[in-house]
């Protein structure tokens, strides 16, 4: 287990805190332009189908806190053990409870590499699983199942779009591009899955469509 920053920026040489708003921001990173994103799209489109690889596992114990895990446990009740999904709840449910349709987020490693560069900046995205796998509509749909390690996930229909912090960390163009028609069809911002069968998985494990 590797604690990357807590809160984000506390031990990262390329981030600094902004006391006025109490969050971490970028300092020495140039955001990708739309032209640069378009130029990198071919590599993203070449993401493997069928079976890919789990590149990064990130727990979020608290707001703006990230912990990188080599081995992770997933349960039906809590999603990623050590993550704050259940405790945080949701403003989109009637009782404020966590939404099972938004339990775990998967994002494409190739697009994240394109917008973030160094792997040290990947956890800023806030996604629990970074995978080298085609997440497009042509490959995955709601109800499809993915297996990784001893865990089985089910793809949900919940949309995943970029938030304000995502735009601040990776640039407005990265969010706009991810939410463009081509970006949505490729799910460049990622997809939601829920735990169907609990278990464990490691960084480097294959992740396969079942």
Image: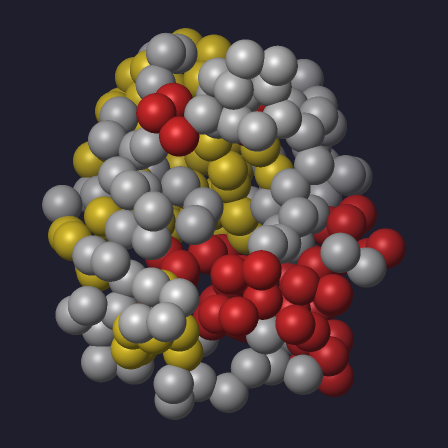
Which quadrant would residue 86 be assigned to in this image?
A: top left
Q: Residue furthest front?
A: 20
- Judging depth in this view, the residue of 57 and 81 nearest the camera is 81
Say whether residue 180 is left or right of residue 210: right
Q: Colour scheme used in the picture? A: secondary structure
**x and y percentages locating residue 189 in the rendered image:** 62, 52
Whether residue 20 appears in this view of the structure is: yes
**x and y percentages locating residue 112 in the rendered image:** 51, 62
Say whether residue 147 is left or right of residue 60: right
Q: In this picture, is 38 found above or below 147?
A: below
- Judging depth in this view, the residue of 169 and 118 nearest the camera is 169
Which quadrant would residue 16 be assigned to in this image?
A: bottom left
Q: In this picture, is 162 found above or below 156?
A: below
**x and y percentages locating residue 172 in the rendered image:** 65, 72
**Measuring 28% from the left and 62% from the top, which residue is drawn there?**
8
**Measuring 40% from the left and 41% from the top, which residue is drawn there?**
128
Q: Residue furthest right?
A: 181
Q: In this picture, is 22 found above or below 207?
A: below
Count the marks: how many?
0
**Measuring 15% from the left and 52% from the top, which residue is drawn there?**
2
Which quadrant would residue 88 be assigned to in this image?
A: top left
Q: In this picture, is 96 found above or below 174?
A: above
Query: Which quadrant of the rendered structure holds the N terminus?
Result: top left
Query: Which quadrant of the rendered structure holds the C terminus?
Result: top right
Whether residue 203 appears in this view of the structure is: no
- Judging depth in this view, the residue of 139 and 162 nearest the camera is 162
**Measuring 42% from the left and 42% from the top, which residue is drawn there?**
129
**x and y percentages locating residue 155 in the rendered image:** 61, 25
């Amino acid at each position: 287990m590797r604690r990357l920053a807590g809160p984000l920026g506390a031990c990262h040489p390329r981030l600094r805190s902004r006391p006025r708003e109490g969050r971490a921001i970028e300092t020495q990173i140039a955001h990708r332009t739309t032209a640069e994103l378009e130029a990198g799209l071919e590599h993203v489109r070449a993401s493997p189908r069928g079976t890919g690889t789990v590149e990064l596992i990130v727990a979020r114990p608290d707001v703006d806190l990230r912990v990188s895990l080599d081995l992770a446990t997933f349960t039906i009740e809590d999603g990623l053990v050590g993550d704050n999904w259940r405790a945080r709840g949701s403003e989109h449910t009637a009782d404020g409870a966590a939404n099972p349709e938004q339990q775990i987020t998967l994002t494409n490693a190739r697009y994240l590499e394109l917008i973030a560069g160094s792997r040290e900046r990947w956890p800023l995205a806030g996604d629990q699983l970074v995978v080298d796998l085609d997440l497009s509509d042509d490959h995955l749909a709601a109800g499809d199942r993915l297996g990784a390690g001893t865990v089985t996930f089910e793809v949900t229909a919940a949309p995943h779009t970029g938030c304000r912090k995502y735009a601040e960390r990776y640039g407005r163009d990265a969010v706009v591009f991810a939410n463009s028609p081509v970006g949505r069809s490729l799910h460049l911002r990622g997809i939601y899955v829920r735990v169907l069968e609990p278990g464990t998985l490691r960084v480097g494990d294959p992740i396969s469509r079942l």
